[in-house]
Amino acid sequence: MKTQKRILAVTGAFGYVGLRVIERLKKSRFYTKIVCTDVIKPVMPLPPHFVYEYCDIRDRQKLKEIFINHKVTDVLHLAYLSNPTRNYKMEYEIDITGSENVLRATAAVKATKFVIASSDCAYGFFPDTPDYLDETSPLRPTPGFTYAIHKVEIEHKVAQFAKDNPKTKIVIMRPCIIMGPHCKSAVAKSLKQPFILGFQGYNPIMQCIHEDDATEAFYLALTKNVQGAFNLAADKGLRYNEMAKVAGKSLVRIPAGIMKPIVSALYNLHLLPFGPGQLTYIQYPLSMNADKIKKVLGFKPRYSSEQAIRAYVSSNA
């Protein structure tokens, strides 16, 4: 699949995942040029074949012009909001409208490869979810969980894009919790609290992928002649109570009938950044089968879920 001139555009190039992927790409000469687009400016020097373009993905015309001017052949879409805000309009514009703009720009240059970060959250959190879903499992976002709802809507738009652009190879990555020394997610921050809250009677499986392993998986998705959806996880994970133990924190279990009204009230008072919809993450089961990514991409994680958590905890002690 490698050609004389491969030019990669990365959206969200200097976010949590993007920055790690950029560092990985510095060690490779697979691409002739790498165009880094973001509203965040690079804090480190870039090699000569890297180009920085300030661009908000909500700016459809500018994004399209960047892709066309640089003759982009491959796209890695990592620009999205991972943590909840109270500005739903902005979240929708960045996640949904922004992704539509990226897809339009990708179509405009007739790119040969498009890789996007989705999430395990696209499968949803429900009482009847079976363990270790494979990539053929239905996508059904949890009501009230905006991040999951957006991921599913974006995947539907990517599916339509695939039908309209059959010559573009598309890879959808569905990572579990990405964890490591540089992580600043809501899940990671919860591990820094004096204790960890859980639901009484629930002990879901928690899968984590080390940030370095996630980076390598995205690199393989870009550079290997593959397409399709891939669950990204290191192993079968560990139970919620085991995660608390690894983090060295006490687990305080609260009945669901008490927890959800309290969280809802605190959210309405602007004392919590998330509402009861997000609580399903630590209540109902959701785990993924990662056999496909290991077999098709040759992905070999170096860290287990437990080691990924320990890497975060030890670096943020």
Image (cartoon, rainbow, N blue to C red):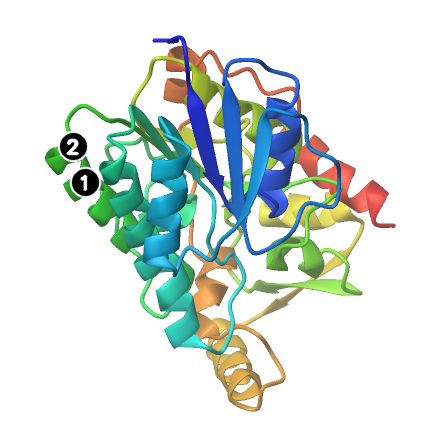
Are there few (<14), some (14-19), or many (20+) residues within 10 Å of tag 2? some
Location of residue 76 by image quarter: top left
Relative to residue 35, is residue 119 drawn left or right? left
Residue type at mark 2 is Asn
137 shown above or below 217: below
Relative to residue 62, is residue 155 drawn left or right? left
Viewer can see residue 125: no
Q: At 72% from the left edge and 55% from the top edge, which residue is drawn? A: 191
Q: At 39% from the left edge and 33% from the top edge, which residue is drawn? A: 75
Give the residue pinned by disc 2.
Answer: 165
Residue 288, image x, y percentages: 41, 35
Residue type at mark 1 is Phe
Q: At 60% from the left edge and 26% from the top edge, which residue is drawn? A: 213
Relative to residue 94, is residue 82 drawn left or right? right
**Disc 2 versus disc 1: distance between alpha carbons?**
6 Å
Which mark, residue 308?
none
Badge 1 element: helix
Quarter of the image with the N terminus is top left
Residue 20, image x, y percentages: 64, 34
Q: Residue furthest right?
A: 317
Which mark, residue 161?
1
Q: Are marks 2 and 1 in contact (CB under 8 Å)?
A: yes
Residue 39, image x, y percentages: 56, 56
Front-lying residue, 125 or 103 = 103
Location of residue 163 by image quarter: top left
Badge 2 element: loop
Viewer can see residue 252: yes
3 shown above or below 170: above
Front-lying residue, 78 or 260 = 78
